[in-house]
Amino acid sequence: MITMKFGGTSVGDAQRLCEVAAIVRSHLSRRPVVVASAMSGVTDLLLGTARLALERKKDEGLRNTEELRRKHLEIVMALVEPGDARDRLVREQGELIDKLETLFRGVHLLGELSPRSLDAIASFGELLSCMQIAAILEARGIPARFVDARPLIRTDSSYGEAAVDIAVSNDRIRAALLPLVESGVVPVVTGFVASNAEEITTTLGRSGSDYTASIVGAALGCSEIWIWTDVDGVMTADPRVVEGASPLGEISYREAAEMSYFGAKVIHPKAMQPAIEHGTPIRIKNTFNPSHPGTLISSAGNSSAKIVKNVTSIDKLGLVAVEGSGLMGAPGVIARLFAALARVGVNVMMISQASSEHNVCLIIPEQDCRRAVEELRAELDPELARKAVEAVRVRDSVSIIAVVGEGMRGVPGIAARTFTAAARADINVIAIAQGSSELNISFVVDQSEAHRAVRAIHDAFDLG
Ligand code: ADP
Ligand code: ASP
Ligand code: MG
């Protein structure tokens, strides 16, 4: 058995969907389970329309829902033959969009849009998409069944990016999907969506369908999890930033997790967890170029390959610096900083401490900076009052650049090469961090210089 996940661009138009059907057909002997995303652009459209409803911009909102209706109807008309199945699909999709309009009207009337409502609204993209994929497969003679993942994947109530209860989910996934696969049916499971103990819709976070695929693939004991997307695999850098970026043949789970955590959008960082636990290899493949072998992600990776495999950047971050001579040798200060940030739900992406300068830098998402600084100032109030801490400063619009590769462990000179390349490109390095795992070197630059830094390092390590 294999799990195949198709991302937004892979299900984004009629031609792609024909390719999806062809791919599924050519692997039927491997008993595929399909997981799919919303059509590309649909999740953004749904979340955007919810915000328009909140701002009471009725005409623009109505235009968006009409676009959604048209987009899906066009696909169904093009790919499903006239008949009962098509009529049923058109009716069911129409009912879903009507329901969605009721939700938008609710937001408009109440003037309120909670994270819980956003999840409910966002879930419609995957429901609409997977319903039509199942019908398209059926129309091509491939037995298939639409499966709503909400009753199968149990999460907590952290709307927007809920935490999965793996034990409960595994049992439900097996109970629902194994009988289908055993009877020769291809389940088409909605990515991204889940529900909490009260059966209220939650989501796994943006790009969360990769995570769904990994949960499903691991629960079913699949031999591989294939992530179908629009590039030939995990590349040496974001191909939109570096023209000469090239696909990597094999990487380890740890490398993939590190790359995706630091901005390689091609796979969600959480997708690695279930795969690691069950030792299931993940393969990244291109629906636009299906014969390309893609990237294999496994525990082995490829130790004979280059020392540095990939350079990524992650934008829209802020740097919070806590400065003061009283920080030096004061036990527990870092713990207090982390505890304060945890209280206001702020995730620290990177930390860098220069004890000689009495300075701790925390890199966090830019949108959280205000909240973070307020909480840190409150926490450090006694130290600020007695000048043990001089200031809690913030700098917006910074990026983390990460240089990733397992081969750098124990090899001297990687940091020197990285920073020489940055210096040659006239890039100012604001802060630096390297984990003791020696899997990556990460540093902070002004966002305006991030892409230039990625290109300079990509060149310096001959990654193209
Ligand atoms: P999907 O809709 O299939 O989930 P995504 O847009 O989420 O696709 O991810 C694929 C995109 O990730 C690629 O089109 C590419 O632009 C971007 N990307 C960023 N960094 C990398 C990288 N290192 N390797 C491959 N793709 C990357
Ligand atoms: N449709 C969701 C998103 O756009 C989930 C996904 O595509 O993985 O974020
Ligand atoms: Mg994605």
Image (cartoon, rainbow, N blue to C red):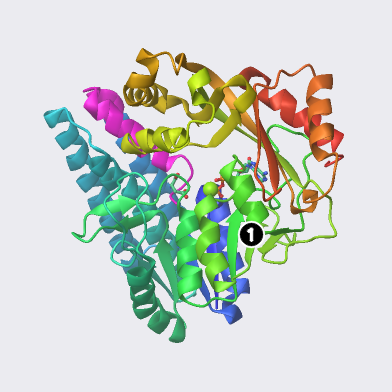
Q: How many numbered discs, if any?
A: 1
Residue 157 locus on image (x, y percent):
26, 51
- The quarter holding residue 69 reads top left
Residue 410 locus on image (x, y percent):
81, 50
Q: Which residue is mark 1?
A: 253
Q: Is residue 60 left or right of residue 448?
A: left
Judge whether residue 39 is colored magenta: yes
Q: From where the camera sits, is residue 323 visible? A: no
Q: Is residue 350 above or below residue 97?
A: above
Judge whether residue 152 is colored magenta: no
Residue 285 locus on image (x, y percent):
66, 58
- The quarter holding residue 449 reads top right
Q: From where the camera sits, is residue 328 visible? A: yes
Q: From the image, which quarter does the N terminus lie in?
A: bottom right
Q: Is residue 288 left or right of residue 14?
A: right
Main secondary structure of the magenta stretch: helix
Query: Callout 1 environment at 10 Å: few (<14), some (14 to 19), or many (20+)?
Result: many
Q: Amino acid at mark 1?
A: Tyr
Residue 183 locus on image (x, y percent):
43, 86
Q: Is residue 234 above or below residue 67?
A: below
Residue at disc 1, secondary structure: helix
User: Which span is picked out in magenta?
Assistant: 37-61
